Every structure is written in C-alpha cells, then in structure tokens.
Amino acid sequence: MKILLINPPNSGKSIPEEEFGIKSIKMIFRGEPLALEVLAGNLSDHTVEIADLKVEPDSLRGHLESFKPDIVGITGVTCEANSVLKIAGEVKNHHSSSIVVAGGHHASCDPEFFNQSYIDYVVVGLGKSSFRELIFAVEEGKNRKIIPGVAKTAPGKPLFYIPRKYSTDDLVIEKEPCYELVEKYRDKYVMSGVGGRTAFVAAAFGCTHKCSFCSIPRITGGRYLTGSIHSVLRDIRLLGDIPLIRLVDANSFGNIEFSENLAKKLIDSGIRKKLVADVRADTIVNYPKLFSIWKEAGLETVVIGFEDVCNERLAQYNKKNTLLINTEALRILKEIDIKVIGDFIVSPDYGHKEFERLEEFVSENRIDLPMPSILTPIPGTPLGEMMKDKIEIHDLDYYTFLNAVIPTKLEKKIFYETFSSLMKTFHKQIRD
C-alpha cells in the first residue's frame, strides 16, 4: 500500500502579538519528525513518503497528486490539532478514497477531538505497532474495530477503542527508522543556541514520573520503556556525519543501569558525537558519577525541567522535586562541565515578585539556556482536568505554551510585557 505520513506546518496563534503588538521571542528550532520516521521503519513492506510541512508548508497538494496515497497518517501536538483537521479535510477533498488516520500527542491525550468526519481512525498512544496492525487489517479486509490503541471514528457518537497494554514489543526496536525519507530536509533540522544541524534518536519512551502538566505518560499508558543499546548505537551510526544527536526521550536516564551501560558502550564504540538529553534534577543529585561517564561519552548539554523556583508550586505540579535539589544538580553539572537548558513554567498567577525571583534564580545559577513557557492545561492531562473550569480560551491554536489560556493575576498586557521582557533578558544572557 502507499502510505503518506504528514508532519503538520508550524501552527499556533499569539495573544501578545494579536492584542498588544508584542512579538513573541522564540528559539529557532525545527526538528525532524522522528515519530513518522519510526512508523515508516515498521512499514518497510509498503511504499511510504513523509511530507514535512514544517519545512515545505505548501507541498501537501503535490504529494497527494503525485503519490495518490491509500492511507494518510497525520501526527500533531495540541497547538497543531486544528491544523491536523484542516489537513485531513484537504486530503479528503483532493483524494477522497484515502483513509485518514490521526495520531500523536493530542490524539493520545484527547482522542475524542478527532472524532470527526474527515478522520477515519485515531491511533491513541505509542503507534508503531498499532498503526501497522491497522494497515494490515485494511489490506486484508479484517476487523479494524478490535485493534488495541486504534479507534474507528463515529461522529456524533462516543469514540470507542480498546486501550493498548504497552510493552517493549511496541517499540519494534529491530526496525530502523527511515531517516532517508527526510534526507532532502536534513540541513533544515537545527537546534539553534546549542549546536546547529541536529538529528534525533530515541532511547526510551514514556516517563518514570507523572507531572500534572505533562502529556508524556499518556503515550505509553504510564509505563517507562527502554529500547536497546544496539538500536541506539545503530541509529546514531545511520545518521552519518551529523555532529549533534538529540536523544528525544522525555527522560533518557529513567533506568540507571541501562543508561550507564549505554554510556559505556558509546565510549567503547568510538562514536564521537555531541549529545543532548533530558534528565531530572534528582537523578543528577542521586547519581552524579553517571554523568561523569556520560560526559566522556559525549553528553554536552542536558535539558532539565526545573519548572519553578517555589517548592509549593513544584508540589502542585506533582514534580516530586525541590528547589534545593535543582540547585545541587546545577552545581554538579557545572563541576562536570555539562551545559544546561532549563525549562521553566511561568504561571498566569505570577506577580512581579515571582517574575523577579525566576530571573534571579537563572542569573545566580548561570543557566546556559533558560527556556520559559506559560503554564498551559493540556486537555487530557491531570492539570487540564484540575483547571478545566478556569480555562477561558478553548481554541487549541493558542496552546503554544506562549499564551495564557486561563486568567492572569496581573493585568493581561502587563503580564505579557513582563514575560516578553524576561525572555529578552534570557536571550541577551545567551548572546553575551
């Protein structure tokens, strides 16, 4: 069968720009659609194309007219959900016989959103096996309603599907990602501020924790699954001379034994790449020697979700962490000489004092690349459920993490001006 996998274009709207003329300041980052590459890797007996509309936003019609796909799979996060529906409509209008399947983060958190006429199926959660099983059922004319993790849409009726019980089998680690399908886009995939041209590799899926704002646990039903050392080394080698490898796991160090063995194998393999990976601060504090090994293996930068500088808010987010642990983790990494990208959540109930405390924390701890976002209750997450009565903006185009979709404590214009000033300060710090 002919299968077209689509990465939607850059999506989202900006309240500060639309209402107050404040242009959002963002790091320039365009990453490859690894989720689609790994889906394609498990479909080697079919003809697959990837349309990356983030790189070529006007290329959809060309793909549809030249390829004439039997099945179209579209991925998307929450701020892209409306774009997924728009793309699905375009597919049906130009090639009505195509079966359209929605998947990705938003489909996993809020599958009911895609229970609409332009969508035929929704893949909920990790989709490597589920999507392949759906394609097999279509090809063989078998029952498509009993595939775990796959829902047949029924607009106007509740969406029904059998939840999938995820295991390492769902990772299909023996299959290589089809990196070659995006080769023509390769020079466009960059991680500005860290190292330029970047490629993605997955070592683990899911997370060991359940922060209230995070959609990751829904992808694997709350499980944390590691790949294999062989598959990680294989995928890095497949990427050739690209100098920077981003391990895209929500937590690359959730299994300490696996992480240590992987680092040692990287060292022994002779692979010499700059590596970026996500880690929890408490993991660094509990296992400092592990990061000395990873430094030797090529780990240059870590991404840490510090989230806030207030212990009370960290508890509200179910972060299972403290300000003291965050500070100690930063001290350890400075000693090892590993750079830090620090993720912070600016709550809409911030006042001037909270903004000042965050700026002081970043300055005092010399965080290399601070990345503030605005607290956003994603549908389907615990935070989304807790805050559903406070949400005043339901248009998912605004769920970019740079808009306040619940009321702000400060007057709205002042909140956005203060947030914009904070970002300018952080970015100036990076340049200096």
Image (spheres, rainbow, N blue to C red):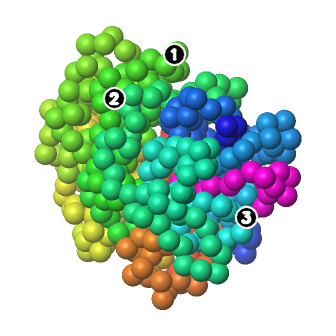
User: x%, y% of residue 125?
Assistant: 45, 56
Indicate which disc, 2 or 1, sits on the residue closer to the N terminus. 1
Q: Nearer the viewer, mark 1 or mark 3?
A: 3
Indicate which disc, 1 or 3, sits on the residue closer to the N terminus. 3
In the picture of the structure, the residue carrying the numbered disc 1 is 240
The answer to which image quadrant residue 338 occupies is top left
At label 3, the amino acid type is Tyr
- Is 381 left or right of 58, judged from the image as shown? left
Q: Residue furthest bottom?
A: 389
Q: Which residues are the magenta region?
A: 89-107
Callouts 2 and 1 close, C-beta under 8 Å: no
* Residue 234 can be seen, yes or no: yes
In the picture of the structure, the residue carrying the numbered disc 3 is 118
User: x%, y% of residue 299?
Assistant: 34, 29
Q: Residue furthest front?
A: 141
Which residue occupies 59% across, 45% down?
140
Dot 1: within a 10 Å radius of its alpha carbon, few (fewer than 14), some, or many (20 or more) residues? few
Label of residue 299 in the image = 2
Q: Nearer the viewer, mark 3 or mark 2?
A: 3
Q: Nearer the viewer, residue 196 or 189?
A: 189
**In the image, is residue 257 above or below residue 216?**
above
Tag 2 secondary structure: strand
Q: CA distance from mark 3 to mark 2?
A: 44 Å
